[in-house]
Image: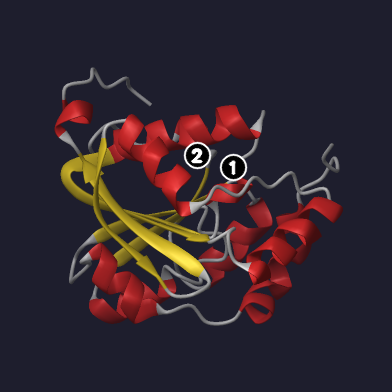
Amino acid sequence: MRLPFDHFNLIARYYDRLIGRPEYDALSELLEAGPGQIVLDVGGGTGRNGIGLLAVGARAIVCDRSPEMLRQARAKGLPAVLADVGRLPFAAASVGRVLVVDAFHHFVDPTPEAAQASAVSELLRVLQPAGRLVVEEPDIRRAGVKLIALMERLLLMGSRFLAPDRLMAAFEAAGAATVTVNDDGFSAQMVFTRGPAFSKRKLAPP
């Protein structure tokens, strides 16, 4: 059961203060983002990650399904697109860098299993063959993350956390190649590219 409203619309104005500053340098390094590079920040909410990429000359486009979160991103001067990760409004192989930070476990509509499988496929679909997809997710094996998962369950957010090995397996099964996996003690950062198996698939339009 989930509550019949968007939690993120309710907390959008306070989200940045609640969550804190992300590690911009680490994300830029994993993305290999540089001057002029366009980064699609999927589930990017208020643009708290995208704004940091400006320091290296990259340009972030925030994509999220919460209008109020996107309002905050636009207030920062970031382009923002209202869309669901299951049907991204971008052409196949059109984006060189894709970023998903602390969002994958929120891809749960209509069901977590269906939404996350669709998200994997769509994220790879829009990624250019030589592009990089960075997915950062709280590591559900950690005690602190288990507490967060419990809190989100009590709030009826419907979240579904996957352990890093399961998340990596899901992307690889969809045709991704894993470039590297880091662990900062709380979250896992996984870097993917489109592998040969995915490149052979017929890509559907958005």
Residue beneath disc 1: 107
Residue beneath disc 2: 85
Q: Give residue 25's quadrant in the image.
A: bottom left
Q: CA distance from mark 2 to mark 1?
A: 8 Å
Residue 114, x across and y down, in percent: 57, 27
| Residue sitting at x 75%, y 65% | 11
Which one is closest to the eye, mark 2 or mark 1?
Answer: 1
| Residue sitting at x 24%, y 75% | 57
Choose the circle earlier in sequence order: 2 or 1.
Answer: 2
48 left or right of 9 in image: left
At numbered mark 1, what does the secondary structure look like: helix, strand or loop? loop
Q: Which kind of residue does numbered mark 2 sit on?
A: Val
CB under 8 Å between callouts 2 and 1?
A: yes
User: Relative to 123, does residue 190 appear above or below in the rendering?
Assistant: below
192 left or right of 22 in image: left
User: Relative to 130, does residue 200 appear above or below in the rendering?
Assistant: above
User: Relative to 136, does residue 158 appear above or below in the rendering?
Assistant: above
Circle 2 crowding by C-alpha within 10 Å: few under 14, some 14–19, many from 20: many
Q: Which kind of residue does numbered mark 1 sit on?
A: Phe
Residue 197, x across and y down, in percent: 19, 27
| Residue sitting at x 36%, y 39% | 171
Residue 201, x across and y down, in percent: 22, 20
Q: Is residue 95 visible?
A: no
Residue 169, x across and y down, in percent: 38, 39
